[in-house]
Amino acid sequence: MRSLLLLLLGCKGGPTAEECLTCTCTEEAQPSFGANHVTDPVDYADPPPTSGPHNPCWLEPGVYTEEPPDERWVHTMEHGAVVYLYNCPDGCADEVAQLEALHQEDTQRTLVAPYSLMTSRFAAVAWQNRLLADCLEAERFRQFHNEHVDNAPESTTAPPPEGCHDADDTGATDDTGGGDDSGGGDSGGGDSAR
């Protein structure tokens, strides 16, 4: 019935802004909860956060195997990034591989990380917007990315300020700058937090 209705309305049959095709998902636009820099941990009221106080050190785009502090990736979103999150205590290697493939489509403005504080299994989060889902539909996440990437108060792909990597244990596993792993000379951030 849905396909017939979409056909009658002249739609191409893709998911709408509010739904996924094979599982429950919800896209939410949220108000701004600020953008102040803080050095203490933040207890976000409704995780995953889409804005709010955050650490002055943002995370570089990349694939993180350990859960980084949300205060850091909130700052990355303030710079226009889309963050792909997963919460799979029993494992979801196939879906994580799909998220990593989505990251490879835009290595300058996405990051992938585990996030244990959300009740959904998967999320795509951008400044003041999020898509929460029980399953991973790569095309729906790609659509979210295309609608919300680089739509934030600041737009930069610059690496974090000097000193942000000194005590960094965020678990990034890939080079996000498109250069070599030496950390020198590439303009996109290179030696990501490993």
Image (spheres, grey):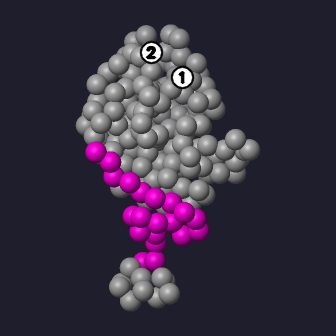
Residue under the point 33% across and 33% down: 52
Q: Position of residue 62 (x, y in %)?
A: 53, 34
Q: Report the residue that reaches farthest toward the right.
A: 90
| Residue assigned mark 1 | 193
Q: Report the residue that reaches farthest toward the front.
A: 45
Q: Where is residue 166 in the image (x, y as percent from the top left)?
A: 50, 10
Measured along the vertical axis of the image, is residue 44 above or below residue 95? above
Residue under the point 33% across and 45% down: 128
Asked whether the beta carbons under mark 1 and mark 2 sit within 8 Å of each other, the answer is yes
Residue under the point 51% across and 44% down: 84
Could you tell me which quadrant the C terminus lies in?
A: top right
| Residue assigned mark 2 | 164
Going by the image, does 30 lie left or right of 93? left
From the image, give the main secondary structure of the stretch colored magenta. Answer: loop
Q: Give the quadrant of residue 35.
A: top left
Q: Does the magenta stretch include residue 13?
A: yes
Circle 1: element type: loop
The kind of residue on which mark 1 rests is: Ala
Q: Is residue 15 magenta?
A: yes
Circle 2: element type: loop
Q: What stretch of residues is rendered in magenta?
A: 12-31
